Image (spheres, rainbow, N blue to C red):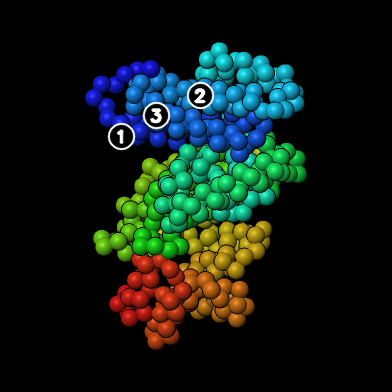
Amino acid sequence: MTAHPGRTTDDVRRTLEAVWRMEAAKVTAVVARVVGDVGLAEDLAQDAFVQALEQWPRDGIPDKPGAWLTSTARRRAIDRIRRDVNLASKLQQVGHQEELRVAELAEGDFDAALEDIDDDVLGLVFAACHPALTAQARISLTLRMIGGLTTREIARAFLTTESTVAQRISRAKRTLSQDGITIEIPSGAELAPRLASVLEVVYLIFNEGYAATSGRDWVRGDLMEEAIRLGRVLSALAPAEPEVHGLLALMEVQASRTRARIGRDGEPVLLLEQDRTRWDWALIRHALGALDRALTLVEHGQGPAGPYVLQAAIAACHARAHTAEATDWGRIVALYSQLGAIRPSPVIDLNRAVALSYAEGPAAALAVVDALVDAGALAGYHLLPSVRGDLLARLGRDDEARAEFARAAGMTENDAEKALLLRRAAGED
């Protein structure tokens, strides 16, 4: 332990929380290898966190805080196994190699023991995002086990109660235990759908931050940052998967516009009206590098361009245009057509219509949007009347446009977006 004179309990707690963000997944993965139960491993890792809260303010912060947490959680795991009435069968399940691993950890050489932990962490990600869990459970468990967020932080992030999040996590861990789901990386035909589930969870977290579905704020930077952090972890753990790099590129390009997306009074600023000098061009360069890696992998036969690679390519078209007028709308229409071919969706059709309105004019796009209205698949989606209102306004059909904006305002639960739509309905924008 290293003493830190003058550091308050709050200072130590903040340090511990930062360490936990970085180490939670590794600690849980190591313990899961010992106990063979993902839910139990997460409980034991949390126990280590609580013990650190009690000891570190008194004894000082360890020289290697991550190793301290791993050691503490591992000791609790071994104690749990020893107390189990089925000790012999438990040890048999762990196996000889894992006994050696436990012995290695017991010797305290955690730096060496964690050098090969990446596969375990990736396996933990797949477990937390298992399709057997509901989408909300996967999100909560991923933020808890991989992101290191507390129940309170997850509840605050998604504007719900701690008890609701706690129940989701508890049910999720019970499901993982009952179904015998362990930390392993799927292979063969199982890999693609399981990876898709992982990426979906990360993108759901990001999207809730990028355009919050409810509440006062339009943008939730904390959730975007956490999703990008998870995306970077995934890109390091699965460097040969194009879709992983595609998702990271997509999130980073979208996040690069954050400062320009919010006006002086907190109101939303739409893409084509944004001051592009306020975009984060360093983040854009990083994103374009991730997209290049994804496209290189596609070119070398690692698989076709999937939905995240294609969406990242669309986002890159905007990122490369230093003015709205310089946007390559024809390229964007073509990319949306590719995306719609592999993942048919009325939302993709709506986005393609927006691009078409700038490539060929609002009249051509309105025909597509009217067909979507008639189909009824987006009847409860507020962006459908919002887009239709914009097209009508560009065609000079102002009364109809205002009615569409009013309809859209009545369908959204986000206060900032509602205010923007009501201003457009009143003819103020």
Q: Say left or right for 251 vs 104.
A: left
Q: Nearer the viewer, residue 46 or 429?
A: 46
| 82 vs 159: above or below | above
Residue 10 - label: 1
| 326 vs 18: above or below | below
The answer to whether mark 1 and mark 2 are in CB contact below 8 A is: no
Identify the element where label 1 is drawn: helix
Q: Position of residue 271 (x, y in %)?
A: 40, 61
Q: Which residue is denoted by mark 3 in the rendering?
A: 54
Residue 72 - label: 2
Q: Nearer the viewer, residue 289 or 93?
A: 93
What residue sits 52% from the left and 15% below the top? 108
Q: Earlier in the sequence, mark 3 or mark 2?
A: 3
Q: Say left or right for 188 vs 100.
A: right
Residue type at tag 1: Asp
Placement of the N terminus among the 4 image quadrants:
top left
Residue 413 - label: none
Placement of the C terminus among the 4 image quadrants:
bottom left
Q: Residues within 10 Å of mark 1 (few under 14, many from 20)?
A: few
Distance between the alpha carbons at the discs numbered 3 and 1? 12 Å
